[in-house]
Image (spheres, rainbow, N blue to C red):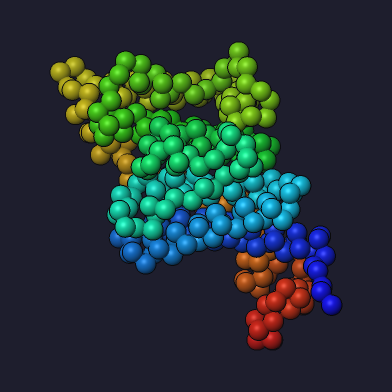
Amino acid sequence: MDRKADPETQLEVDEAILDYLIYTAIISLLKLLDTIDISPRQEHNTHLLVQMVDTFLPVFRALHTNYKASPEIQLRLRLLQFTYVFVHHYYPFRANNSFSRRPSISTENPKDPRSGNPHQEHPQAMSLEQTLPLFLALSAVQNELQGSTITEIWMMLAAGYMAQAYIEQVVVYQNQRPGLLEEAFHWGYDVDCRAEEATEQWQINDMFGADESSVRLWQSIREEHVQALHPPEKTSLVDHLEDMASGALSVVTFKEKVSEFLAGLLSAYQPPLLIQLERGEVEGLSRKATKALKIRSGFIHQAIDET
């Protein structure tokens, strides 16, 4: 006699697996970002973890067509997407590297023409200018989920991100088109924003316009960074920006701050259930209840070993 899994139980199991895969992929990417000398094995293992999420997502969607992810899982998916493109940007992966097979992580339904993989439109690693909207959207979703407002520390990070994006365009891509600096720093509160509510553009605008004091502070920080990027008299723009990138706007420091931001965002929420079971401590459960749950969840050998 054929036995079929209870739909609700199957959803819970699949969701736990999905959350676990997303979390472990993010952790691996963050370790990659913080490693100076990355080994081919480390790159390969990280890619496999990301690819497992990429492979599991369409299967999950096919099995659970009406599923709506929890805000925490949606946030972790966004975090994974951004962390991936940010890591991929800074490491010149070799042509035969597994990272050349870019995943199609998306927080939207794949049938949505607005979703898709940003890498598919950009065969090479995305520029910082292209990743900036992902960073801002991730931050906006996090603020909305936490019911918080942007801080001065975050504003400094965001302004530094915009500065790095501008420096890269000028120094790396040799792009000095008129208005480039203004484009890089155009982000902020627009009282006339006509974006549809709940869209990313609307969320980002709402984030910058949380209150009047935040609007004024962001304008001040943004202007300070813009002015710092103007070269002194008799100094070329490229020379000035190269000096900034190795000094006041150090690329190394910028990467470290982004890595700290991402790690902090990940740790702001309870780890997935399967991660907690691995660690032997589940939020809200006693040690005895955790042991029983591990047995029911298939962690039998771990539970038996405990005393």
The residue closer to the viewer here, 242 or 297, is 297
Residue 159 point in image, percent of width and height? 43, 30
**Between residues 246 and 135, which one lies in front from this camera angle?**
135
Is any part of residue 174 visible from this angle? yes
Instruction: Tell me what residue is drawn at x 70 percent, y 58 percent.
Output: 15
Identify the image quadrant of the N terminus. bottom right
- Residue 241 locus on image (x, y percent): 25, 30
Place residue 254 in its image quadrant: top left
> Residue 180: where, in percent of width, then height?
35, 20
Asked whether residue 267 is in view, the answer is no
Question: Quick one: quadrant of the C terminus?
Answer: bottom right
Residue occupying the point 33% across, 50% down: 91
Q: Residue furthest left?
A: 234
Taking 194 as reference, is 121 left or right? left
83 to the left or right of 109: left
Residue 283 to residue 119: above or below? below
Q: How many marks?
A: 0
36 left or right of 74 in image: left
The outermost residue toward the top is 192
User: Is 59 placed above or below 191 here?
Assistant: below
Residue closest to the eye, 21 or 147: 21
Q: Between residues 200 and 51, which one lies in front from this camera angle?
A: 51
Residue at coordinates 57% horizontally, 17% vertically from top-left? 190
Q: Is residue 80 left or right of residue 271?
A: left
Image location (x, y in percent) of residue 36: 32, 57
Q: Residue at x 32, y 15 (%)?
A: 178
